[in-house]
Image (cartoon, rainbow, N blue to C red):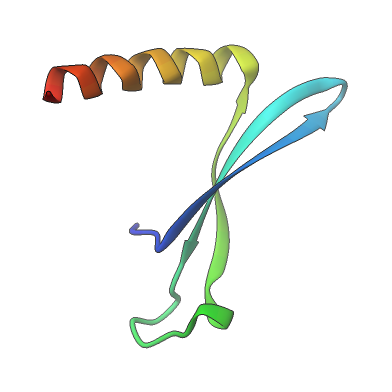
Amino acid sequence: MQYDRIDLRVHEHDGDRRIEVDGYFRPHPESKPPEYRRNVIVDLTEEQAQQLHDDLGEQLEAWE
């Protein structure tokens, strides 16, 4: 699924801080921004977010 916009939110769940990555997509190709739908892509613990950060950093360095 392709997203027009990606947002990051930080929230607490059961006393743990979590990072939620949301994507906004168009239900139909001709949809206007007010019609976009928000979809949670991932909901990460701090440890998972750190691991993803490390993995993405390595991948981006390999592309350079």
Where, quadrant-wise, is the N terminus in this rendering? bottom left
Q: Is residue 36 left or right of residue 16?
A: left
Residue 42: give x, y in percent of width and height. Answer: 54, 37
Residue 25: give x, y in percent of width and height. Answer: 45, 66
**Taking 26 as reference, is 59 above or below it?**
above
Q: Nearer the viewer, residue 62 or 39?
A: 62
Residue plotted at (81% across, 29% down): 13
Residue 56: give x, y in percent of width and height. Answer: 33, 22
Residue 45: give x, y in percent of width and height. Answer: 64, 20
Q: Is residue 19 left or right of residue 52?
A: right
Q: Quadrant of residue 52?
A: top left
How many numbered marks are there? 0
Residue plotted at (27% across, 14% down): 58
Q: Is residue 61 left or right of residue 2?
A: left
Q: Quadrant of residue 46?
A: top right
Q: Is residue 64 left or right of residue 22?
A: left
Residue plotted at (64% across, 31% down): 19
**Taking 1 as reference, is 41 above or below it?**
above
Where, quadrant-wise, is the C terminus in this rendering? top left
